[in-house]
Amino acid sequence: MARRRHQIKVNELSGMLVYMLAHRPAEFGIVPSRDGFVPFKELLKALHEEPGWRYVRQSHINEVLLGKDRFLFETESGRIRTVERKWEIDFEDGFLERIPSILFAPIRRRAHPVVMEKGLIPAPGRLLVLTPDESMARRIGQRQDPKPVLLQVEAEKARKEGISFSPFDTLYLCRKVPARYIAGPPVAKEMLKVAGEKEAKPIEEIRLADAFSAGTFPLDLARDPAPHRREKGKKKKGWKESARKMRRKRK
């Protein structure tokens, strides 16, 4: 009986993965790569947000991939896709006659000051992903920051002035959004201070909450998801320079 219950759970997980990857990835805030792949890490984050699926680990997905439904899936370098897919993504710039007037974009708190100044710019080879659903934007943002900042993008105005958007089900893909189309909460004072200490930080920080990759958008597992770890040396130098200035002022 226990074995039968276990097999039922494996079958149910297989069905859920097929629905997420082959039918409605956008429903879960997922944008697969051009060839249909989604990183396991991104898939698990989205799956854990669904009631009743938080228990799932990589080992459970591996059971599906070794079971009777293994022919439905393909894996490659930490990514997974279904053999058949019912969705399409237009990754080329396209003209849309209609678009929601406002789209939401979640960003990490530490990127807030830079984005408000320079706009939303994705990492090289990727696309921004925006949504008209505020709750979906928050859900996506919380995958990388427990308290993401939600920005509002004047999408219709931007479209009329030449910014291209491509629809993907209920989501919208875009190459960049200049700061003049972005509105959001005031930047916290502590973040302004941090931004001032990191003026030389690479523009790689200016991207959406690495929520997914599009081409594309789910996370690239080969890339460090916390670029600030590579900036430790710069942080230390900035602190020392501030200390020297303070000592000179006292003299």
Image: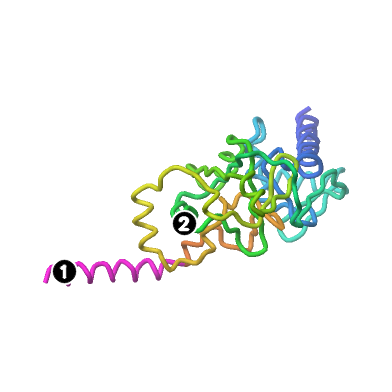
Looking at the image, residue 249 lies above or below residue 167: below
Residue 194 located left or right of residue 42? left
Looking at the image, residue 251 lies above or below residue 207: below
Q: Residue flagged by tag 2: what amino acid is it? A: Glu
Question: Can the viewer see residue 142?
Answer: no
Decide whether residue 247 is among the magenta residues: yes
Residue displayed at 44% across by 42% down: 185
Residue 249 - label: 1
Prevailing secondary structure of the magenta residues: helix
Residue 51 located left or right of residue 87? left
Residue 164 located left or right of residue 250? right
Which quadrant of the figure contains the C terminus?
A: bottom left
Residue 183: give x, y in percent of width and height. 50, 45
Location of mark 2 (residue):
117
**Where, by quadrant of the figure, is residue 193 drawn?**
bottom left
Residue displayed at 59% across by 40% down: 137
Residue 32: give x, y in percent of width and height. 73, 51
**Where, by quadrant of the figure, is residue 21 drawn?**
top right
Question: Can the viewer see residue 159?
Answer: yes
Decide whether residue 86 is among the magenta residues: no
**Is there CB contact under 8 Å for labels 2 and 1?**
no
Q: Earlier in the sequence, mark 2 or mark 1?
A: 2
Residue displayed at 65% across by 30% down: 51
Which is more toward the observer, 66 or 175? 175
SS assignment at label 2: helix
Which is more toward the observer, 163 or 168? 163
Which quadrant of the figure contains the N terminus?
A: top right
SS assignment at label 1: helix
Residue 113: give x, y in percent of width and height. 43, 54
Q: Which residues are magenta?
A: 231-251
